[in-house]
Image (cartoon, helix red, strand yellow):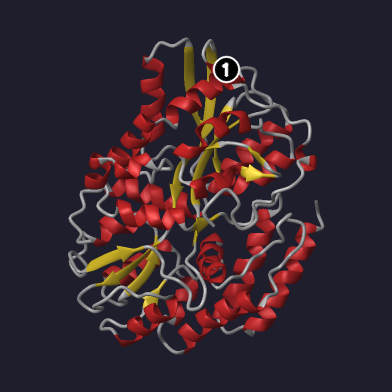
Amino acid sequence: MRNNARLSVLALICAGVVGVGCGDDGGDGEGSASGSGEATAGAEKVDPAAMENAKGDITYCTGKDTSGDLKEGVAEFNKLGNGVTVKLLEFPESADEQRNQFTQRQRAESGECDGFEADVIWTAEFASQGWLREMGPYVEGRKAEFVPSTLSSVDYDGKYWGVPRVTDAALLYYRTDAIDKKPATWQEAYELARNADPEGIVYQGASYEGLTVAYLELAFAAGGSVLSEDGKTSEFDSPENLEALEFMVDGIEEGIAPKAVTTYMEEQARRTFEAGRASVMRNWLYAFALANQAPETKGNFEVMPFPAWEGGEKANVLGGHNMVISTYSENPAATLKFIDYMTSAERMERNAVKYSKPPVLNATYADADVKEAIPVAAELKQAVEQAKSRPVSPVYSLISQAIYKNVNQALSGQMAPADAIKQADQEITKALGTF
């Protein structure tokens, strides 16, 4: 698709930030930790019928609303005069600080935040601590509306713990003045990048959450996994995961990806691509508008969902945010009423058109105004549809650290790929033993 975008740069930058940390088709993605429900037995459920007559004031907590879509949604909801009034409470921009603000309140059993904007990687931890209300009775009634993969991010222990509001999945960018076809596989993408002018591929290879995501996109496509189906055992030490890591290491050793990629986050990869120093890039949607303004890349690139792994499948990793209700809310019915509005078709369309937020509803991608505002909506939907959740575990942060630290060491030449996989597997196993 040619790039006549009119996307908001600021909004897209925010979407990119959400995508990383903020990271199968159907409800059971990689570690959706389907289970008997014993780990979360006794959780209070929401009552969808109670929304109709809900009244009162509630507080919805979130990280810094840098794009303004939440502020607008709250303002519009409050104008409805339906008996519920929402106050938006914003926390600092840092993802770690946001999480700290939420966990401090939940540990204190505070009802200050009736609901909050939860990163997709927080579901299992918060649900296992008893901090969230079960949302299954509500989600089941709307299940067909959502892109199926997005529901995997709220699925833990066989139950739903939130409602997806914003999703994200990375895309493959390639220079059309250097590459004359869409790569069918990752292997072909690397080979095309090797022979292109400018030469090379860039991605997020620094030792942080972005590398966990970039690596798992390849590992999942190769048929690898991180955890067992019940989320209790590490399956990281596998031939498939090793194959994916060796492929990435070979790409650096052969000069297809620059050695500096081991220090790249989103912005370094974007700037390298825009400066004409790479023909292929893995990045989030936010980079689309920016690359379409840069002199070197304007009109000279296309985007596509990730290709398949040779002999494997296609896979992405979900980013985004979900709306959840605190166990300690004194007005869960009013909070659900607000969530129902914020995840409605009307708000999804508005958020996509005005704020370039990747939608979670199937129908939004077919909206004419959305397709005009996001020219790559079809490609984005395919990417979201083929996406999986990151491992759903109460100790996800430790699991991710084990992955990105050891993968980065392998990419940097400090550790052999096989040793990196075994070390990560041991660290994941140790983390799983802590809960």
- Where on the picture, by quarter, is residue 301? bottom left
At which x and y percent is residue 336?
54, 24
**Can you say whether 352 is above or below 85 in the image?**
below
- SS label for mark 1: helix
At which x and y percent is residue 435?
80, 51
231 or 274, which lies in front? 231
**Can you say whether 308 is above or below 165 in the image?**
below
At which x and y percent is residue 43?
73, 31
369 or 362, which lies in front? 362
Q: Amino acid at mark 1?
A: Ala
Note whether residue 374 is visible: yes
Note whether residue 88 is visible: no
Name the residue at 33% across, 58% down: 287
427 or 337, which lies in front? 337
Q: How many marks?
A: 1
Q: Quadrant of the N terminus?
A: bottom left
* Side (left or right) of 123 relative to 15: right
333 or 434, which lies in front? 333
Name the residue at 77% across, 44% down: 36
At which x and y percent is residue 165?
46, 38
What residue is disc 1 on? 49
Name the residue at 19% across, 61% down: 2
**Can you say whether 94 is above or below 20 in the image?**
above
Name the residue at 48% across, 43% down: 93
- Where on the picture, by quarter, is residue 195? bottom left
Q: Residues within 10 Å of mark 1 (few under 14, many from 20)?
A: few
- Where on the picture, by quarter, is residue 46? top right
